[in-house]
Amino acid sequence: MSFDQISSIAASGMSAQRLRVQLIAANVANSETTRTPEGGPFRRKDAVFQVADFGKTSDGLPLMGVQVSDVIASSEPFITRYEPTHPDANAEGLVQYPNVNPVEEMVNLTEATRAFDANVAVMRAVRNMVLSAQDLLRVQ
């Protein structure tokens, strides 16, 4: 497996986790949004990852990475609160809030950040190996 192939795999992971972090940020930013253009409160969104086929290595082995196949909206029920003075309250005085749990979002953010950092570490290791190989070639 070449350094370019390893870098491509790590880059695919970084790209997927970057999108995941963006979705988490949108979820947290909209955690109090009770009215959207689509109607109703904001729905939590999450990325669905799948294996990405990058072809074959020089040895004929499959070369796999990751990609985001879809962004799905949560089907969990909304949070309902009694706030009769809220502009979005129904006839009973209940307001529906997004199905976003800030604690869960922070756990997901930590997980996505660590996965991103792991891919950055792979990229750094590849770069260091390339630089070491260049140094070896210069000496001879």
Image (spheres, helix red, strand yellow):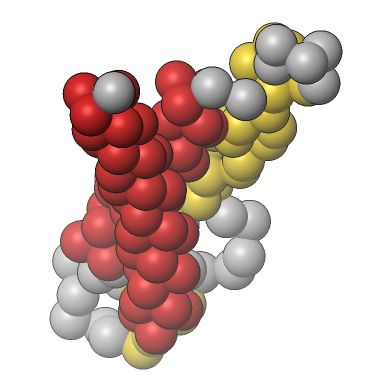
- Image vertical order of residue 93 relative to residue 4, above or below: below
Q: Nearer the viewer, residue 103 or 56?
A: 56
**Residue 70 shows in this picture:** no
**Residue 43 placed where, x, y %?**
45, 54
Q: Which of the 4 image quarters holds residue 139?
A: top left
Residue at 70% x, 11% y: name it: 58
**Residue 126 placed where, x, y %?**
38, 39
Quadrant containing the N terminus in the rendered view: top right
Residue at 61% x, 31% y: name it: 65
Name the outermost residue toward the front: 140
Residue at 29% x, 23% y: name it: 140
Residue at 43% x, 78% y: name it: 107
Q: Nearer the viewer, residue 138 or 2?
A: 138
105 left or right of 88 in image:
right
- Image vertical order of residue 89 relative to residue 29, above or below: below
Q: Which of the 4 image quarters holds residue 134?
A: top left
**Residue 86 placed where, x, y %?**
19, 75
Q: Which of the 4 image quarters holds residue 54?
A: top right
**Residue 50 placed where, x, y %?**
68, 35
103 left or right of 128 in image:
right
The image shows a total of numbered marks equal to 0
Q: Nearer the viewer, residue 133 or 121?
A: 133
**Residue 54 shows in this picture:** yes
68 left or right of 42 in image:
right
- Image vertical order of residue 79 relative to residue 65, above or below: below
Q: Nearer the viewer, residue 41 or 70?
A: 70
